[in-house]
Image (spheres, helix red, strand yellow):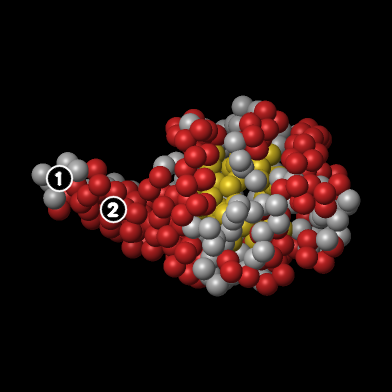
Amino acid sequence: MARITLRQLLDHAAERGYGVPAFNINNMEQGLAIMEAAAACDAPVIIQASRGARSYANDIMLAKMIDALEEMYPQIPLCLHLDHGNEEATCATAIRYGFTSVMMDGSLKADAKTAADYDDNVDITRRVADMAHWVGASVEGELGVLGSLEHGGGEQEDGHGVEGTVSHDQLLTDPDQAVDFVRATKVDALAIAMGTSHGAYKFTRKPDGEILAMRVVEEIHARLPNTHLVMHGSSSVPQPLQDMFNQYGGEMPQTWGVPVEEIVRGIKHGVRKVNIDTDCRLAMAAAFRKVATQSKSEFDPRKFLKPAMDALRELCRDRFEQFGTAGNAAKIKVVALPEMARRYRAGALDPQIGKMTQAA
């Protein structure tokens, strides 16, 4: 069985100095393209589904699809992760359907659009961690509010994202508070705010230190060297994909994403999980538009989906190689959930102790 927890995968990544892209999916075609890319370069995989994806595809369909992908690619360690869980029930039902990792985003209230206070974030994240660890599943928490340092707000994605303007301080994770948060909650990974945001329109110019605060990553890593950091909203929105989308009838205004070189910089300072969704959507949508423009009589959905899968596979393979993920799948011996649960109960996986390979 190739299903792996986020904690074990990120411990392996930390030990060997690489990062792992986390790709959001909604359908079979996305799942196949991601796994084909992983198999082509021997990379472990994080596939994640948001509440929006679970609603769109249905939990049963998602669960069976992941089972099928696992059977098709037994050599690839696969972590199934819940993206932006908004309350305990959301996380609990995900674990029930086979997710080996859940995100409890306590930075927002259960409505997924109103900023929560720190104490409430700690309280609910700790409860979810206790629940998940009891069965061996991993937990990602979030501290700070994901949003733009340019305009002081967030972007909605699948119904998730802060509404209205929030303070500059809320948009940057406080390094000292991060230490307290990890100790109090026992999360396996910490998503931090440094100026990234959901969607395609992250920056109005090529980002620099004023609007993409990578220094925050470095400061938190210095204080929490054994804690796995997560960059959300980290699609790069490649210019060639923007150009292709617009060439074939799209109307995407010029925008900038998170440069790959900045993500690589983050990986050198403790970033182990990198969330990518917009790039995947854009790659597929640009391919759809090309087929629709060049073959106007075409009505077979497969003739649209196959080129879209090819484009997504190429994008995923690029990220596996750029983040150093490639070549690591065969090096991982997957630990099953019951053994992970035993290690949690024994205190061997406290985030302050160190990597699982050292502590188990």
Q: Quadrant of the N terminus?
A: bottom right
Image location (x, y in percent) of residue 90: 64, 31
Q: Secondary structure at mark 2?
A: helix
Q: Is residue 349 something one can see in this rendering? A: yes
Q: What residue did someone put label 2 on? A: 306
Residue 198 appears at what percent x and percent y? Answer: 52, 46
Above or below 336: residue 238: below
Closer to us: 62 or 53: 62
Residue 187 horizontal/vertical position (percent): 76, 48
Rate crowding at label 1 as few (under 14), some (14 to 19) or many (20 or more) other CA atoms within 10 Å. Answer: few
- The answer to whether any part of residue 238 appears in the image is no
Q: Dot 2, how many residues are within 10 Å of its Cα: few (below 14), some (14-19), or many (20+)?
A: some
Query: Going by the image, does 269 lie left or right of 233?
Result: right
Q: Earlier in the sequence, mark 2 or mark 1?
A: 1
Looking at the rendering, in which quadrant would you find the C terminus? bottom right
Residue at the image point whose x is 75% and y is 47% from the top: 338
Residue type beneath disc 2: Lys
Q: In x, y percent, where is residue 42? A: 52, 68
Nearest the eye: 171 or 61? 61
Question: Residue at 33% across / 59% down in the picture?
Answer: 310
> Under tag 1, what secondary structure?
loop
Determine which residue is flagged by label 1.
298
> Label 1 is placed on what type of residue?
Glu
Label 2 with label 1: CB-CB less than 8 Å: no
- Relative side of 22 to 268, left or right: left
Q: Foreground: 134 or 219?
A: 134
Q: Based on the displayed image, in which of its 4 quarters is residue 127 positioned?
A: top right
The residue that appears at 72% across and 62% down in the rendered structure is 11
Q: Please state which of residues 50 and 230 is positioned toward the viewer in this rendering.
A: 50
Q: Is residue 47 left or right of residue 219?
A: left
From what the image shows, is residue 11 above or below residue 64? below
